[in-house]
Image (tube, grey):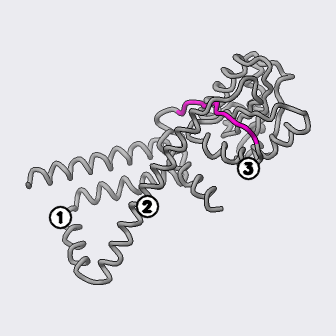
């Protein structure tokens, strides 16, 4: 029994350490810190501390459990943990399904903006652009809308950056419309839809974004009555945990508000 407890503690500590490292790498490597990896780092630290001091923690919890208020608090915390787990699994399932939704042929591609480094696309944005390129090359009648405004630390708008990238990779300029006002996913879709209506473009759309982002973007497209499919860019592994966790919070916000 003692050996089993030691093995469990070791496994939990290693899981916490792996999570901590996985979420802190983007901070160290690229200075990326958001609610996703901040939460992951905190959970990783808590898991390591729990594993390191498990006997003492259990002793405190047992003492607390023998009080009425302790049973109530611990019961609420346990119920909350289960709810969070169920939500995370449900959201993940929806993300996977949305990313697998195939667009129709020659749909209007909407490339959702992301960080621009100076005048060059970030790793995340380049993945979206490469996915859009593949679809546009396979569907020569398809028109593209590149959607994204200019951040304070960006030299050009995300839309212009995407436009330059696409034409440099062989997409004709007349196939691309720029939407350079948006600052959120909802604005990406809303302002792009204005262009679709104004120019009489196909209202069946293909959303080019990272795989974890397809579900939320698709739900927003549904709000505008758009038929959509996914053109998903693959997120590099070292960034996926951070942005996946961040997206969980974003989906929850979208559901609530």
Mark found first going from the N terminus, 1 or 3: 1
Q: Residue at x 85, y 37 (%)?
A: 196
- Residues packed near mark 3 inside 10 Å, few (<14), some (14 to 19) or many (20 plus): few
Q: Residue at x 26, y 51 (%)?
A: 12
Residue 118: where, in percent of width, then height? 70, 35
- Left or right of 136? Residue 201 is right
Asked which quadrant contains residue 2, the reply is: bottom left
> Mark 2 = which residue?
83
- Residues packed near mark 2 inside 10 Å, few (<14), some (14 to 19) or many (20 plus): few
Q: Residue at x 87, y 22 (%)?
A: 174
Q: Is residue 102 visible?
A: yes
Residue 36: where, in percent of width, then height? 51, 51
Mark found first going from the N terminus, 3 or 2: 2
Residue 192: where, in percent of width, then height? 80, 40
Mark found first going from the N terminus, 2 or 1: 1
Residue 15: where, in percent of width, then height? 31, 47
Q: Hey, which residue is sitting farthest bottom in the picture?
A: 68
Report helix, strand or loop for mark 2.
Answer: helix
> Mark 1 = which residue?
55
Report helix, strand or loop for mark 3.
Answer: helix
- Left or right of 84? Residue 45 is left
Q: What distance separates the C-alpha of mark 1 from that of mark 3?
A: 51 Å
Q: Residue at x 77, y 43 (%)?
A: 149
Task: Out of 245 and 201, give the one closest to the viewer.
Answer: 201
Task: Out of 193 and 18, give the one closest to the viewer.
Answer: 193
> Mark 3 = which residue?
223
State the extent of the magenta-drawn residues as a range: 226-235
Report helix, strand or loop for mark 1.
Answer: helix
């Amino acid at each position: 029994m003692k050996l089993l407890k030691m093995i469990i503690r070791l496994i939990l500590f290693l899981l916490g350490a792996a999570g901590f490292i996985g979420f802190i790498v983007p901070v160290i490597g690229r200075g990326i810190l958001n609610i996703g990896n901040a939460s992951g780092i905190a959970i990783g630290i808590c898991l390591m501390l729990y594993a390191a001091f498990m006997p003492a923690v259990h002793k405190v919890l047992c003492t607390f459990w023998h009080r009425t208020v302790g049973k109530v608090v611990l019961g609420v915390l346990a119920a909350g943990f289960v709810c969070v787990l169920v939500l995370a699994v449900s959201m993940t399932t929806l993300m996977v399904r949305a990313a697998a939704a195939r667009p129709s042929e020659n749909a209007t591609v909407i490339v959702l903006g992301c960080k621009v480094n100076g005048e060059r696309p970030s790793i995340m944005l380049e993945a979206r652009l490469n996915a859009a390129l593949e679809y546009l090359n396979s569907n020569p009648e398809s028109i593209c809308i590149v959607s994204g405004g200019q951040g304070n630390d960006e030299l050009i708008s995300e839309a212009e950056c995407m436009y330059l990238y696409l034409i440099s990779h062989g997409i004709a300029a007349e196939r691309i419309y720029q939407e350079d006002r948006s600052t959120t996913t909802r604005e990406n879709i809303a302002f792009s839809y204005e262009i679709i209506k104004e120019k009489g473009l196909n209202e069946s759309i293909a959303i080019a974004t990272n795989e974890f982002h397809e579900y939320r973007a698709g739900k927003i497209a549904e709000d505008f009555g758009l038929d959509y499919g996914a053109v998903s860019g693959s997120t590099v592994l070292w960034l996926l945990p951070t942005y996946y966790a961040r997206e969980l919070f974003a989906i929850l916000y979208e559901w609530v508000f």
